[in-house]
Image (cartoon, helix red, strand yellow):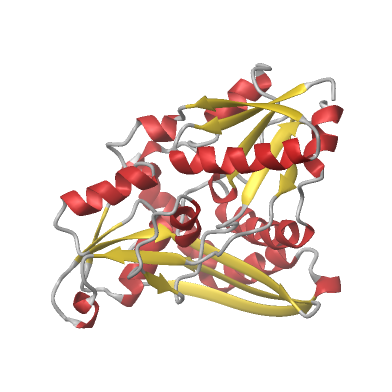
Amino acid sequence: MSKIIRIGTRDSELALWQATTVQQKLEALGYDTILVPTKSMGDQVLDKPLYELGVTGIFTKTLDVAMLKGDIDIAVHSMKDVPTQLPKGIVQVAVLERAITHDILVHKGSSFLESDQPSTIATGSLRRKAQWLNKYPHHKVVDLRGNVNTRLLKLIENDWEGAIFAQAGLERIKLLPKDAIQLDWMIPAPAQGAMLVVAMDNDAFTKDAVAQLNHTETELATTIEREFLRTLEGGCTAPIGALAQIKDQKVYFEGVVFSLDGKQKINIKKEVKLSNAQGLGKRSAEEVLQRGGDKLMQEIRNENSTVH
């Protein structure tokens, strides 16, 4: 192999785990690689909620720039952090086989879940916040930013009852507490649990190498979910969840959008043959928009613009 593939990644423990996984898979195929860690804007600005920063792709933009400048050949991302519209010249090359999609609650004792007393839960995600408040309207949700390790430390240091994380992230770096509660009622972020590798469209050598890592079933499921997000969202930050699961030649899809306070909810469930899966995300989103989702999305955009 004539070229060393430079792998761009954020420098958090979880991001490095993901990039190293891709590195090992490429090297097993006989390619030479090197890791190029960098710090994203999302990792540097920790005193504001993500939605207040008003930047799409806050965790991916630094790596996009590095790739466009020719400093790296590929970038490895948590797919849920990646905007549905990639920068011109950068293309999706591989989606690795997906890990578990669930969110979990890391807590200091779970008895508060059965109580009517006010409790405080931490998360930096509008989607998690809205779903939590929908189920527990008497609770307070506070913002929580930083990489996984930082967020776990903040939970210990503050008098919150718990914090919400992606199960896959904590499992990957072996920090999943034994008593964590799986939130099987919470619809995950589109593409949660999946890793995405992008490259320059004009780099045939790298694209051919990385394409061998693609997991077709995960690619299809995440495409449906991200299509749902893109059709609904129109570029604003909103509490949107989506999950496509493929079983027995069928696709089972569930999508949801909430108001920011969690009081309003519009959801959709679809079951289609695998052969009819193309466009499922878009069709589902259009149905949600027709059922009042357009009005709800406009309200969210208005609320977000007042924050910015």
Q: Position of residue 213 (x, y in %)?
A: 76, 47
Q: Could you tell whether 155 is left or right of 228 in the image? A: left
Q: Nearer the viewer, residue 64 or 37?
A: 37
Q: Position of residue 9 (x, y in %)?
A: 56, 32
Say if residue 185 shows up in the picture. Answer: yes
| Placement of 104 over or under 305, stated as above or below | below
Quarter residue 208 falls in: top right
Say if residue 145 shows up in the picture. Answer: no
Query: Residue drawn at (46%, 64%), measured in percent from left and top?
Result: 296
Quarter residue 211 falls in: top right
Q: Nearer the viewer, residue 219 or 228?
A: 219
Q: Could you tell whether 294 is left or right of 213 in the image? A: left
| Placement of 215 over or under 83, stated as above or below | below
- Quadrant of the rendering where the C terminus is positioned: top left
Q: Position of residue 39 (x, y in %)?
A: 45, 27
- Quadrant of the rendering where the N terminus is positioned: top right
Query: Residue drawn at (80%, 30%), measured in percent from left and top?
Result: 206
Q: Position of residue 67 (x, y in %)?
A: 65, 24
